[in-house]
Image: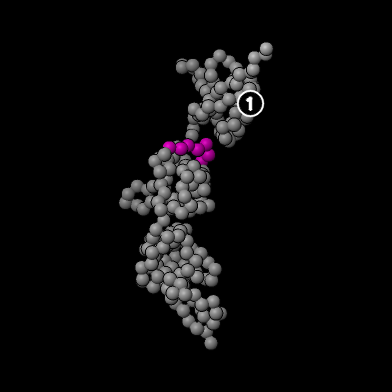
Amino acid sequence: MKKNKEALVFYIDNKRFETFEQFMTGAALKKLAGIPLHIKMYLAVQEGYEPDLIKNDEQVDLARTDVEHFYVEDKLKFTINGEPFFSYEQYISAEKIRELGKVPGTDELFLKVPEPYEDELIVDGRQVDLALPGKEHFISKPFSVVILVNTRRKPWAKRTVTFEEVVILAFGSYDPNPQKVYTVNYSGGPEPKPEGSMVKGSVVLVKDKMNFDVSATNQS
């Protein structure tokens, strides 16, 4: 009876993989591990020897006596809520950070900044440079702030507020009558636009102690 072919085991950045193919190209190995093609990958060798740089078009024999260990030298390390991660790419999106760290959409995401400065808010859609000096540390916090609407404190539990919601906070209701004109100005908000004005249908990010000045007039 013919013996079943055994899977060949190898490691890429300490992650275990198996294949029934004796030869794989460097490009195929990178694709398997999610490593971009432009990133340099090495094969670990015996101590005292230089590691082998694996080119994308190079065929690697995975059936040799020893289990092969491949690695990327220049990984960019960061943490999310204290848990270590690494990236092969220089830039990472806020959405990818949330995915990796299992950060709920209702939480705010911040980049830790040394005191006495405030932690930097990372909004969805933003790309963060991981190649800056030092290791980046990201943290998440449940979102809950107090905003000031016509100087009155208003608890708020969403990361954004609409023009109509601000008017309701100011006057208790919103009148869609075109003869009713509302003016909304804000200040003390988060970057990239900490101050400005709002119009019907607009939405802004909110920040603790953010100020909204709201007025209403009737047009004749």
Q: Outermost residue toward the left?
A: 116
> Start and end of the magenta stretch?
84-90
The type of residue carrying mark 1 is Thr
Whether residue 51 is visible here, answered yes or no, is: no
Query: Is the residue marked by circle 1 packed among few (<14), some (14-19), or many (20+) residues within 10 Å?
Result: some
Residue name at image x 53 percent, y 52 percent: 125
Q: Outermost residue toward the bottom?
A: 220
Q: Outermost residue toward the top?
A: 1
Rendered view: 18 above or below 97? above
Q: Position of residue 136 (x, y in %)?
A: 42, 42
**Nearer to the camera, 158 or 110:** 158
Which residue in the protein does label 1 denote? Answer: 25
Residue 88 colored magenta? Answer: yes
**Nearer to the camera, 29 or 16:** 16
Q: Position of residue 199 (x, y in %)?
A: 52, 71
Q: Position of residue 116 (x, y in %)?
A: 32, 51
